[in-house]
Amino acid sequence: MKKLLLILFCTILIFGGNKAMSENAKQPLEQPFAQGEINPFGKYFTGTTYLQMLCTKDDVWNSSVGNVTFEPGARTNWHKHSGGQILLVTAGEGRYQEKGKPVQILKKGDVVKIPLNVEHWHGAAPNSWFSHISIEPNIPNNQTTWLEPVTDKEYLKNEVK
Ligand code: MN
């Protein structure tokens, strides 16, 4: 009986520990806004990303604001916004690149002002979670055009080996 209780106790310990670990993985970043759910626009991204809308498109502010969280290595496809975009970096380390320019490193507090119709991508560093607030201004005159995925070769081009 004692042995049985011991086994039961150990089982609770093990499963309790696993539960804590999985909850940790679910909310891996210390960040000011909610991580949200799996990104419904995931087909335009590489890797897993999460989206929490903070201000949906409407006629008052003409802006769409959302919190986007990227797992390590995750990034958007190449794309462009006809009304531009502003990124406010809130946590982790990220990457940003405009077509034909070097990849930039993004850190908490960075602001990226993406001009109208400039082809670009944004995402996490290879070894870091990352989150940014995405502001799409000029709605309803701001359409996003999604293009091809950022290949591993493009993504890793400037990474230190
Ligand atoms: Mn963008």
Image (tube, grey):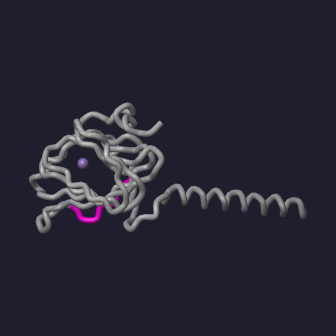
Q: Which residues are magenta?
A: 50-56
Whole-percent x, y for residue 70 in the image: 40, 50
Predominant SS of the magenta segment? strand
Q: Residue shown at 28%/65% (left/top)?
A: 54
Single out the residue that lies furthest toward the left. 141
Label count reads 0
Residue visible at 15% across and 50% down in the picture: 115
Q: Nearer the viewer, residue 78 or 95?
A: 95
Q: Quadrant of the N terminus?
A: bottom right
- Where is residue 31? Give x, y as percent: 41, 64
State left or right for residue 147 relative to residue 7: left
Q: Nearer the viewer, residue 49 or 124?
A: 124
- The percent position of residue 12, horizontal first and vertical second, equals 72, 61
Measuring 86% from the left and 60% from the top, which residue is drawn there?
4
Residue 6 point in image, percent of width and height: 84, 62
Judge whether residue 54 is colored magenta.
yes
Q: Quadrant of residue 156?
A: top left
Q: Is residue 128 magenta?
A: no
Please state which of residues 86 and 149 is positioned toward the viewer in this rendering.
86
Q: Residue furthest front?
A: 160
